[in-house]
Amino acid sequence: MNVDPFHLNRPVHLARRDVFYEQAKQLIQELPTHKDLEDQHETVLKALALFQDALHHANAANQSNETTDKDLRFSYFLDACVDNTQSITRMLRRQRSVNSKDSNLTTFLGSEDTSAKMATHYRRCAAHILKGTLHLLSHAEAPYHHLQQLTFDAMTSDERARYEKARKHLLTAEQN
C-alpha cells in the first residue's frame, strides 16, 4: 500500500485528465466543420473548459510521488492546449464583437470598413491558431497513448479498476 496521501486519488484524477483531454481534442478537431460563428464560439468555449479541467486533474494527479517526468511534460502540453484554445476563443469573441450592428469599435473609429477588415483579421488569426493547435494535437497522439500505457502498466490491479470505474462513470455521465 502506498502511504503517499496524494497517490490515493491518482487513478481518479488520471481518468478525469484523460477523458476531459480526449473530449476537448474531439471538439477542437470538429471545429473546422462548424460554419456558424456562434457555433464555433460555443464549441471552443466547451473545449477550453475541458482542457482546463484536464490540466487541473493532471496537476492533482502530479501531486503523487508516483508522478513521472512524462506526466509533468503532459501537463505542460495541456497548458499549451489551454493557451491556444484561449487565443482562439479571444479571436472569435473579437470577431463577433466587430460583426455586431452596434459594434463599439465601429462606433469609436467611425469606420465600418475598418471593422470589416478587423473581423477578417480576427477570423484569420483564429483559423491560424486552430491550424497550429490541430497540428499540435495530431503530433501528441502517439506520445499520449504511450503515456497512458506506461501509467496503466505502473498501476496495481486496484488502481486500474478505480481508473476504469472513474473513466466509465465520466463517459456514461456525458451521454446522459
Image (cartoon, helix red, strand yellow):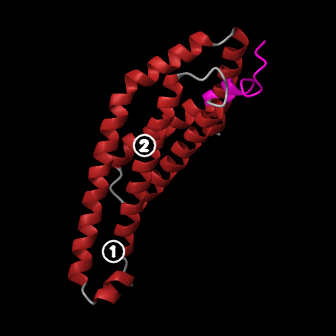
Number of other residues with Cα within 10 Å of mark 1, as a class: few under 14, some 14 to 19, many 20 or more: some
Q: Residues within 10 Å of mark 2 (few under 14, many from 20)?
A: some
Q: Residue at x 68, y 28 (%)?
A: 12
Q: Is residue 92 above or below residue 157?
A: below
User: Magenta region: which residues?
Assistant: 1-15
On screen, residue 117 above or below 164: below
Identify the amino acid type marked 1. Answer: Asn
Q: Is residue 75 left or right of residue 93?
A: right
The residue identified by callout 2 is 80
In the displayed structure, 12 sits above or below 131; it is above
Residue 107, percent across and down? 34, 88
Residue 35, numbered circle: none
- Name the foreground residue: 167 vs 143: 143
Whether residue 36 is visible here, answered yes or no, is yes
Kindly identify the residue that appears in the image at 29 percent across and 64 percent down: 122
Task: Label the magenta part by its dominant secondary structure.
Answer: loop
Coordinates of residue 108 in the picture (x, y in percent): 34, 88
Q: From mark 1 to mark 2, how far is it between C-alphas?
A: 29 Å
Instruction: From the image, tell me which residue sits under label 1.
Output: 99
Q: Amino acid at mark 2?
A: Ala
Q: Quadrant of the N terminus?
A: top right
